[in-house]
Amino acid sequence: MKKPTVAIIMSTYNGENYLREQIESLLQQERVEVSIFVRDDGSQDTTLEILESYKEHLIFVKDGGQNRGVGNSFMEALYQAGLEYDYYAFCDQDDVWLPNKLLQAIEMIGSIPKPTLYCSNQLLVNQDLEQIGLRHQRTLDTSSLQILNDNLVTGCTMVWNQALQELLHHSPNRPSSELLTVRIHDVWVAMVASAVGEILYDSNAFIYYRQHEQNVVGVRKENIYVNWYKKLRNKSKRNGRSLLAQEVVEKFEDMMGEPLLSELKIVSAYQRNFLSKLALIRNSHIFSLSNESKWALRLKIIFNLI
């Protein structure tokens, strides 16, 4: 029986500490045929040397090697992975995959014809792979409004079918570089899948999600005023939610249903005038899944920070 083919999509950046361990875990995936697409985002350590030592197992994405940021780097690798594989998966440089990670996802997706994205829980571990515990203790909300407000669908657990890859790969559907700077690759893929297809969540974990100085889940929560000040100083970070809503509507309006389409249009247009802001403030459902207070959200709308 022919093994399912999977394109693993990885972006690396100064990943010398844990990269070998991750690549080895990819090569040990059971009952699947993997092709590993790697784009380096301008590493200054020995990452490139490590990748070169695995060159017979890797497909290098060559576009100059300049630093484009994590979101743009991952999506460039996704585009170059093409359309010939049965399934596709994002991969971080510092985790470790269990041998049945891809197989579990493929079995859950099955033969669903519509665009389908699989995601799972993660087993948090320290830098020495000593277990800390599961990241999520309850089933994730993978609705479009949840992703818009606070995406919990982590890229390193994502596996998707060819139907979704066709949508993501199609040139007119590709997100702007600006959006990928603000909301990065996994948010975009999750939003598209939720808006026009389906997301399957697996509460089990098949990945060791390594916690270290450069990658720690939920330990830094800045004061709300500090956060606002940073957004006001950094124009590119101001309007992540509205830009995400705008681009999803622009590219997939014909495939979306109500009430989601109307709600995303309200978010995308809120900066036009006072009435547009008022329409967003009055629509309590759009931000009902946000963990921010109503007053905080209203202030963000007034100051164009949504």
Image (tube, grey):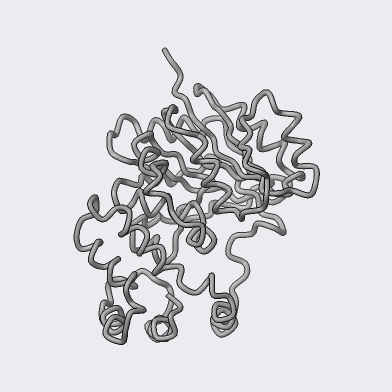
Position of 138 with respect to 157 (left or right) is left
- How far across and down, in percent of the image, does residue 194 sit? 33, 52
Q: Quadrant of residue 249?
A: bottom left
Q: What's the residue at 30%, 53% (across, down)?
A: 195
Q: Nearer the viewer, residue 237 or 228?
A: 237
Position of 154 with respect to 60 (left or right) is left
Q: What's the residue at 58%, 32% (across, down)?
A: 36
Q: Nearer the viewer, residue 85 or 289?
A: 85
Please identify the residue farthest to the left as the structure is shown.
Answer: 258
Quarter of the rendering occupied by the N terminus:
top left
Q: What's the residue at 62%, 67% (across, down)?
A: 219
Position of 65 with respect to 260 (left or right) is right
Q: What's the residue at 57%, 42% (across, down)?
A: 91
User: Does residue 15 lie above or below 150 as drawn?
Assistant: above
Position of 174 with respect to 14 (left or right) is left
Q: Quadrant of residue 306?
A: bottom left
- How far across and down, in percent of the image, does residue 221 sit? 59, 73
- How far across and down, in percent of the image, does residue 20 sit? 72, 36
- How far across and down, in percent of the image, does residue 41 sit? 66, 48
